[in-house]
Amino acid sequence: MYKSNIAYSTVFKTAAIALLLSGCATQSPTLSSGNVEYGDSKAVETLTNEFGSTDLQTIAESMASSLLQAPVLAAKSRPLVTVAEVKNRTSEYIDTKSITDSIRAKILKSGMVRFAVDTSAMQTQVDELTRQNQTGLYKKSKSKKMGNMEGADFRIEGTITSIVKRAGDVKDVYYKFSLQLIDNESGVMEWADEKEIRKTSNKSMF
Amino acid sequence: MHPFKKIPLAIVLSLLTACASQKPAPRPGSINAKVEQLSEMSYLQVTDLRAVKRNHLLTVQAEISNPDSDNQQLYYRFKWFDANGFAVGGEEAWKPVLVYAHQKQTVTAVAPSPQVTDFRMVVQSPDNTGSMP
């Protein structure tokens, strides 16, 4: 009888502690099926050896920091730059606009350079000016005038190339991202840099 | 001995061991004061760290040494701060670096903005002790 009381008391205490502990845990503000998780967007991604987020991020960081150190940009006070095309000469689909957008965002954040609209955004710029000046919908004094756009001092252009080799189960991919800064008036290349990436995967389990 | 008499002794002992495991704070200006290891790296060491302003931007160069006879993988990124200690430029991507056996590898980073006056280098190696550095 005495032993049975002790056993009941132990069970009760354990249950009480478990209840208290579970009471301490707070609910996360999530609604989930349990199969989806948010991860670190800056993590090193090695799921496959195709071009990935880490490649895009490291290229953008490397090129932006190198470009900001170019003496020609430091010599001028906030020069005006535009982004021309980065040609994709690899065997896979790579959104090169996404790479140049990241580079441009990082350079703009430094406050040392200004960017003029590039060719892909020019039609939108023309449409906006036309809308403000030729539709008759806007006050003359409040509309932005035609003919005041600024020409860029420099343009950024480049290429991305790759070499892919396979030997048995091993696949080796080498990427080279090249970027140049060209003076629009003189046509002189004022700065250039490259970022190389090597990724090797092995299919064999042993 | 009564079991309750053991409790103060146990508390004193645990406090003493806690004090013994506390490492002194790194000296300001030392390499350890600028390097954050997510866990103590077993082999890799940051053996040199220098910073200079170039074109108004803080430029940092770190030397990573691998005294081991095997190649080691390092993941690193920098955190940048302005004069008030606020983070500048958002989070950087983690960058992988392969450090060959007995190699001293140099990595360079440039601050994202002229406002940056201070930095921390965050490092992680898959080969780590699991304990705080």
Image (cartoon, coloured by chain):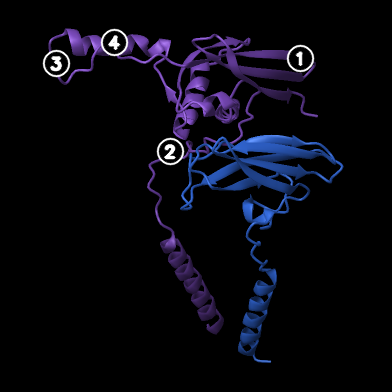
Label 3 crowding class (10 Å Cα cut-off): few <14, some 14-19, many 20+? few
Q: Colour of chain A?
A: purple
Mark 3 and mark 1 lie on one chain; the one further toward the N terminus is 3
Label 4 crowding class (10 Å Cα cut-off): few <14, some 14-19, many 20+? few
Label 1 crowding class (10 Å Cα cut-off): few <14, some 14-19, many 20+? few
Q: Report the mark closest to the observer, 4 or 1.
A: 4
Q: Report the mark closest to the observer, 3 or 1.
A: 3
Chain letter of the residue beneath label 4 in the structure image:
A
The residue sitting at 64% across, 64% down in the picture is: B25
* Disc 4 element: loop
Query: Which of the 4 image quadrants contains residue B124?
Result: top right
Q: Colour of chain B?
A: blue
Query: Which of the 4 image quadrants contains residue A205?
Result: top right
Mark 2 and mark 3 lie on one chain; the one further toward the N terminus is 2
Q: Report the mark closest to the observer, 4 or 2.
A: 4
* Disc 2 element: loop
Label 1 sits on what residue type?
Arg
Label 3 sits on what residue type?
Lys
According to the picture, the residue beneath numbered tag 3 turns out to be A140
Q: Nearer the viewer, residue B5 or A101?
A: A101
| Relative vertical location of residue A156 with respect to residue A12 in this rendering, above or below | above
Quadrant that contains the N terminus of chain B? bottom right
Q: Which mark is residue A33?
A: 2
Mark 4 and mark 1 lie on one chain; the one further toward the N terminus is 4
Q: Which mark is residue A70?
A: none
Q: Report the mark closest to the observer, 1 or 2.
A: 1
According to the picture, the residue beneath numbered tag 4 turns out to be A147
Using the rendered image, report if marks 4 and 1 lie on a common chain.
yes
Residue that extends furthest to the right in the rendered view of this protein? B69
